[in-house]
Image (cartoon, coloured by chain):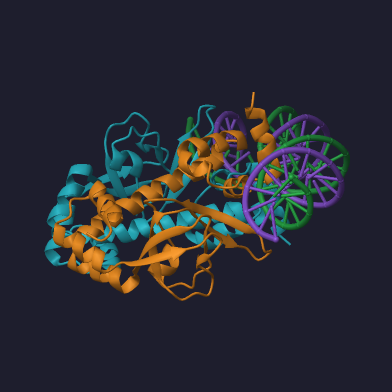
Chain colours: A cyan, B orange, C green, D purple
DNA sequence: TTCTCTAATTGATATACATCAATAGAATTC
DNA sequence: GAATTCTATTGATGTATATCAATTAGAGAA
């Protein structure tokens, strides 16, 4: 098995045959990135989804006013990419930037379709992953509806304990949708 | 075919065999509700997902302070339910309330598992649906990060033209995470 | 129709937060 | 180690929006 981490990840959710896993491995490519480099930028036509083997990335959009909005962080064992572009063929507006030197595995759109057709167990695997992602996004929406900044920051720290220490505070503030100054003040009230 | 609407919906996303659709139909139950009645309330142990044949519902949570937070509306051809409870067996905190007299089709957890095992095409069908739901939730998160209330209200009206006229303004305000008073003022600036 | 109740609007005030600006502290580079 | 750049903190001010309170409009019931 060339990439045991991803095989382990698949086995955590479904029960694949060895041949399924070997097919998967044959359809993957390795990607290495330095800190601050981009996996994806608007305009790029390359359509892949990525599995993080090692490292940390942030996914963000820029709006018309030039403001950045972080939609997701990703660390080891996370899939990351632009579902909308990948899945519906829409042009991507997403930036995928490495916060740390990172190693990833990529799968192209064509290869994923091939995987679905030849090893349907992966339909289930991705259905489960997307369902979980859907649930955690819903929690995030609910959190912005019902909680103040302090509570949301604490929730972020407990939900993503591994990410919190690897990401700059202004990026966390951005993810939470508040100004870095405000997050700084909120953090001060927590040190007591 | 007992329930042609749901068969049409499935065919919109995948290419099922007739036997697949007949199996689906045999696993569904009909539900009728009056306006203001509940399909689901916290504590209810019934674990179903629902397809709206006719009518309109709202899905919301109550927080510790007793405030309501609408997470989703649903009209014809939408699936609605509590994925987290349904999928992970967590106790449900969700309210599902009919805004109009509604007719729905329900599928139980056991029946859905049976469906997946006997007609794997439905793995793909639900994978696609959940992926689309994930994408639209992501758009909603992005919208709250980058847009002001007026822009979000306009976006809501264009994204859900069928829902806007069927739902009270204070429910739309709640969905958007703003006060009804503020939405009222915003709407006034639009009448020119 | 008239009454009643709920929803929508409008006004006045309070508050959380953004923004601008300056400084202090870390980290990176040479 | 010094210099430079990036990050975090702190202060002062402005603004959007929540909240409280009152009024008007509209919808449904008798």
Of D2 and B82, nearer the camera is: B82
Of B151 and A8, nearer the camera is: B151
Would residue A9 be found to the left or right of residue B158 on screen?
left
Q: What is the number of callouts on the image?
A: 0
Residue B48 visible: yes
Q: Residue furthest top?
A: B192
Q: Position of residue A82 (x, y in %)?
A: 35, 42
Above-or-below relation of A177 to B26: above
Residue A77 visible: no
Q: Position of residue B130 (x, y in %)?
A: 35, 54
Residue located at (57% from left, 33% from top): B151
Residue B86, by quadrant, is bottom left
Would residue B121 be found to the left or right of residue A167 on screen?
left
Residue located at (45% from left, 58% from top): B102
Q: Quadrant of the C terminus of chain B?
A: top right
Residue A179, by quadrant, is top right
Residue located at (56% from left, 37% from top): B152
Above-or-below relation of B155 to A57: above
Of A57 and B122, nearer the camera is: B122
Q: Position of residue B122 (x, y in %)?
A: 24, 59
Q: Position of residue B63 (x, y in %)?
A: 63, 63
Q: Quadrant of the N terminus of chain B?
A: bottom left
Of A106 and C16, nearer the camera is: C16
Residue B85, by quadrant, is bottom left
Would residue D22 be found to the left or right of residue A9 on screen?
right
């Amino acid at each position: 098995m060339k990439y045991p981490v991803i095989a382990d990840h698949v086995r955590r959710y479904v029960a694949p045959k060895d041949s399924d896993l070997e097919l998967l491995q044959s359809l993957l490519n390795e990607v290495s990135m330095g800190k601050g480099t981009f996996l994806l930028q608007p305009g790029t036509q390359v359509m892949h989804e990525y599995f993080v083997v090692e490292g940390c990335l942030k996914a963000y959009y820029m709006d018309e006013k030039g403001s950045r909005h972080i939609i997701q962080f990703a660390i080891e064992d996370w899939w990351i990419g632009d579902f909308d572009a990948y899945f519906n063929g829409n042009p991507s507006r997403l930036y995928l930037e490495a916060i740390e030197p990172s190693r990833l595995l990529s799968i192209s759109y064509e290869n994923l379709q091939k995987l679905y057709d030849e090893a349907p167990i992966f339909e289930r695997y991705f259905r489960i992953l997307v369902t979980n992602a859907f649930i955690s996004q819903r929690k995030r929406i609910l959190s912005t509806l019902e909680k103040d900044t302090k509570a949301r920051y604490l929730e972020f720290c407990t939900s993503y304990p591994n990410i919190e220490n690897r990401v700059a505070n202004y990026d966390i503030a951005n993810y939470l949708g508040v100004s870095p100054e405000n997050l700084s003040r909120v953090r001060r009230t927590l040190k007591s």
